[in-house]
Amino acid sequence: MRVDQETEVAHYLAVLALQIGERSFPEEQRATVRQHVLDALACAMIGCRQQTFQNLVALCARVRNGCVWPGCGDERITPADTGMVWAYAINGSVFDDGSREGACHPAAVVIPTVVALAEDRSWERVDSAVVAGYDVMVRLARGGNPLFSRNGFHPTAITAPFGAAATASVLLGHDIATAQNALCIAALGSSGLMAAFRSGGTQPLQVSWGVRNGIMASMMAAVGNRGYSRILEQGFYPTYLGQHQLIPVDQPLRHEYAMAGSYLKAYPGCRHLHPSIDAFDDILKANRIMHDEIDAVRVGTYKLALETEIHDVKSREDAYFSIPYALAARAVMGNNGYDAFDEKHFCNPVLQAFMNKVEVRTDSELDNCYPRQRGAVVEIDTIQGTTLARKVEYPLGEPENPLPQSATLAKFRDAACASLSEESIRKIETLLDVSDPSDTPEGLFAAVCESWRPSRKMK
């Protein structure tokens, strides 16, 4: 089906989502889905450590027959609130997956919706719902990339209600008309500002509220409520772009499904930092250079990476958006893991001095390749007078440079080891066994939450 003057965008996306929802995927594709699910669970185990997450959970009404969240114990909350708090935990980690085409983070939207509605769902249904949710969200976000961000709007947040509504429509078994209404009602809960990143602790709230809105939209549609059928082409895109979409939703993706074109992160922080980290890391490893042997570092990257750059680093959230900090952490501490972005390191005079050695600028060639590529070129001047350079076109975790499943397993274990028992960790890891996981989706998601050891919760 094609989108033309007679076909509403929401109708096309509803048909697409439900068609994907009815497909049976081969094991290779399901393995990709499960790797992204496990990655999202790892992210949630990190994001739930934040005080903002705890404050958000405290505002959710407890119900008798509800859903779980990390650290819930015997308490339960509604499915809509469940999607909201899981979305905060995943997106708040700044460690979640993403899409180059849409410049958005689908896992922070789709996986929380799955957790919220997992009761009595099979793994086959969950797998197809995840693929459908990614496709709808990425296609909508791609239509405004990169202009959404340059207009001041956060692509993940403004498309979150649609990704959640599409995922929920598959899980709830909606027909085409109901799914279309869910997407149209979801538009009423769409908002998100790039300026929110200046206060990183609360920024993920705009994503989490979008997920809650999308789940509610799907539930409202299920009981007969209708939305305006052309709200996407006449409202959403004109409002956020000031024009019609840049790329039609029916234009084929670079891969058969958006899921296959999505990346996974090897370390936390904004994705715009990662090509610079990889290039810098390659130089240090290949030449065995120590931080005190480096005189200057020059980074060339695309314009949007500079536009989101935070120079005055005062918090973990600021560090996640600072290329000089990320490179200094790698040079001085030897890695870019979760702990490397902790605020306890900010007063390190050696790290501060190294940050002053890093210059970041726009590279016109790399900028012309964005968003098809997210690249960086790094040059290092040593105190011996030599210059070493490395260019990275696809950072680790991209489809062209995939993250191995073993790395995702290690990421989950590192995130979960302080809070979950070894038995629970091994049980949850079986979701990667697409032929025979140890439990239902609902059961494995509950295992993330119910075996929590509060005394060992990481701060």
Image (cartoon, rainbow, N blue to C red):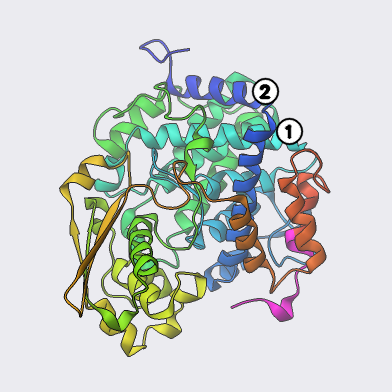
Q: CA distance from mark 2 to mark 1?
A: 9 Å
Q: Residues within 10 Å of mark 2 (few under 14, many from 20)?
A: some
Question: How far from the left and from the top, in percent, is residue 432?
Answer: 71, 47
Res 224 seen here: yes
> Disc 1 residue type?
Glu
Q: Residue 7 is drawn in which quadrant?
A: top left
List the residue tagged with mark 2.
22
N-terminal label among 2 and 1: 2
Q: Residue at x 69, y 74 (%)?
A: 418
Task: Specify start and end residues of the magenta stretch as a single range.
Answer: 448-459
Left or right, 173 with respect to 151, comes to right
List the residue tagged with mark 1.
124
Name the mark on residue 8. Answer: none
Q: Residues within 10 Å of mark 1 (few under 14, many from 20)?
A: some
> Disc 2 residue type?
Glu
Q: Residue at x 48, y 58 (%)?
A: 205
Q: Residue 33 is drawn in which quadrant?
A: top right
